[in-house]
């Protein structure tokens, strides 16, 4: 499941508060070329309004029609689309994507406690991972499509009548939720239990970005990152820049510069022998435009576990800072992207911000970065911190 969950939340909160039922569409299986992969979500209101994308716009209108039927009956439905071959142009929707998708549509309302989206939304807001298994198809009336179980629970959700008769199946569902899926891997599991096909899902928390420097050129970086659903923390040593109103999409804006960073990373201020705790950030960008402050930021980051560290400025400035850092440079260099950002030919602050955020996204996905001083790759566990 991707950070696109944030796109669903405004519609979900609005209609949930109004007690108006919704339909959750979940991509459960793909074959060939598709716009998204298993775990992608779309939310459909009774009016036909929807939030989220599964196909990039090719299927959403048709899915809204399916959603009306699910709203009317309350019975989950599996919609199948196949755009492989020339038949799609004549009999299908004409997307030409050369792939197939199975999409589960299920009704969310007060009667089923708005699950599973209610709990997924809570985990997202609390910035923690959440794993579950979702029933895609079932021959058991007591465990219908749309039912499931969350990791860490002893109870399933969305069960039908006569659940007591299938107590063993429900226990098995909960046990699977505790061990599936593997980290960051959403997987369709046909016949995972007798008569039941499952989707194992892991929703990772929002990517956390540490932005060290709050000048005017940092604002578009924070804005783009927030648009992607990332959780942004901004730090600056200048009070006039470290203002929350200048970064409306950021989760946190801190005054105090390197001292604030040291506290944020869990170090004891003024105690260089203190062991830092693992930092909950997969990426940090140093861009204060102040040499001494950037050096202090890099000094703190060298002792952290942050796997991606970007530094704004030319290579000559990078080498000067690394020389000034002395022995700490050895711990920093393998993780340092400097100059930060993909080579997009960017010259404006907005285009430079795009190059920076794009490089971080590439690193999160394990792609090679042109600005890398030495190769490094973020694991899915690091990206989730």
Image (cartoon, helix red, strand yellow):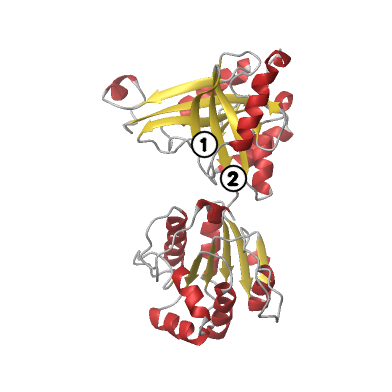
Can you say whether 374 is above or below 282 in the image? Answer: below
* Marks 2 & 1, CB-CB < 8 Å contact: no
The residue where tag 2 is placed is 6
Tell me the residue at 40%/24% (across/down).
81
Position of 218 with respect to 245 (left or right) is left
Within 10 Å of the Cα at label 1, are there few (<14), some (14-19), or many (20+) other Cα atoms?
A: many
Task: Give the residue at x 43% y 35%.
Answer: 55
Q: Quadrant of the C terminus?
A: bottom right
The residue where tag 1 is placed is 39
**x and y percentages locating residue 313 in the rendered image:** 44, 77
Q: CA distance from mark 2 to mark 1?
A: 14 Å
Among the 4 quarters of the image, the one containing residue 314? bottom left
Which type of secondary structure does the marked residue at label 2 adopt?
helix
Q: Earlier in the sequence, mark 2 or mark 1?
A: 2
Element on which disc 1 rests: loop
315 left or right of 129 in image: left
319 or 224: nearer the viewer: 319
In the picture, measured across the screen, residue 80 lies left or right of residue 177, that is left
CA neighbours of label 2 inside 10 A, class few (<14), some (14 to 19), many (20+): some
Q: Nearer the viewer, residue 173 or 362?
A: 173
Give coordinates of residue 195: x percent, y percent: 55, 16
> Where is residue 22 shown, x and y percent of the image?
63, 28
Residue under the point 58% across and 69% down = 304
Residue 197 can be seen, yes or no: yes
Judge depth for marks 2 and 1 and give the one in front.
1
For the residue pair 136 and 347, the one nearer the viewer reads as 136
């Amino acid at each position: 499941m991707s950070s696109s969950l944030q796109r669903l939340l405004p519609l979900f909160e609005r209609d949930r508060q109004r007690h108006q039922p919704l339909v959750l569409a979940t991509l459960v299986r793909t074959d060939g070329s598709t716009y998204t992969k298993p775990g992608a979500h779309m939310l459909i209101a009774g009016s036909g309004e929807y939030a989220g994308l599964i196909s990039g716009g090719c299927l959403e209108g048709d899915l809204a029609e399916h959603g009306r039927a699910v709203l009317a009956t309350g019975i989950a439905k599996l919609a199948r689309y196949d755009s492989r071959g020339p038949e799609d142009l004549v009999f299908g929707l004409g997307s030409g994507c050369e792939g197939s998708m199975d999409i589960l549509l299920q009704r969310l309302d007060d009667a089923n406690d708005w699950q599973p989206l209610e709990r997924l939304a809570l985990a997202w807001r609390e910035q923690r991972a959440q794993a579950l298994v979702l029933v895609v198809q079932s021959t058991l009336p007591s465990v219908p499509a749309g039912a499931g179980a969350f990791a860490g629970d002893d109870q399933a959700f969305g069960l039908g009548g006569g659940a007591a008769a299938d107590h063993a199946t429900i226990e098995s569902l909960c046990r699977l939720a505790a061990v599936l899926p593997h980290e960051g891997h959403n997987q369709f599991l046909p016949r995972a239990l007798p008569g039941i096909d499952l989707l194992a899902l892991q929703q990772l928390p929002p990517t956390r970005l540490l932005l060290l420097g709050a000048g005017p050129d940092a604002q578009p970086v924070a804005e783009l990152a927030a648009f992607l659903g990332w959780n942004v923390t901004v730090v600056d040593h200048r009070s006039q820049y470290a203002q929350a109103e200048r970064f409306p999409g950021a989760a946190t804006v801190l005054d105090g510069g390197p001292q604030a960073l040291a506290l944020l990373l869990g170090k004891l201020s003024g105690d260089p022998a203190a062991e830092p705790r693992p930092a909950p950030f997969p990426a940090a960008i140093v861009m204060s435009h102040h040499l001494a402050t950037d050096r202090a930021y890099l000094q703190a980051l060298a002792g952290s576990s942050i796997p991606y560290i970007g530094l704004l400025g030319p290579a000559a400035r990078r080498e000067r800072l690394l020389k000034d850092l002395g022995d700490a440079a050895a711990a920093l260099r393998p993780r340092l992207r400097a100059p930060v950002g993909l080579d997009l030919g960017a010259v404006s602050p907005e285009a430079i911000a795009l190059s920076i955020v794009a490089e971080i996204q590439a690193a999160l996905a394990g792609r090679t970065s042109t600005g890398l001083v030495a190769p490094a790759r973020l694991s899915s566990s690091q990206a989730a911190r």
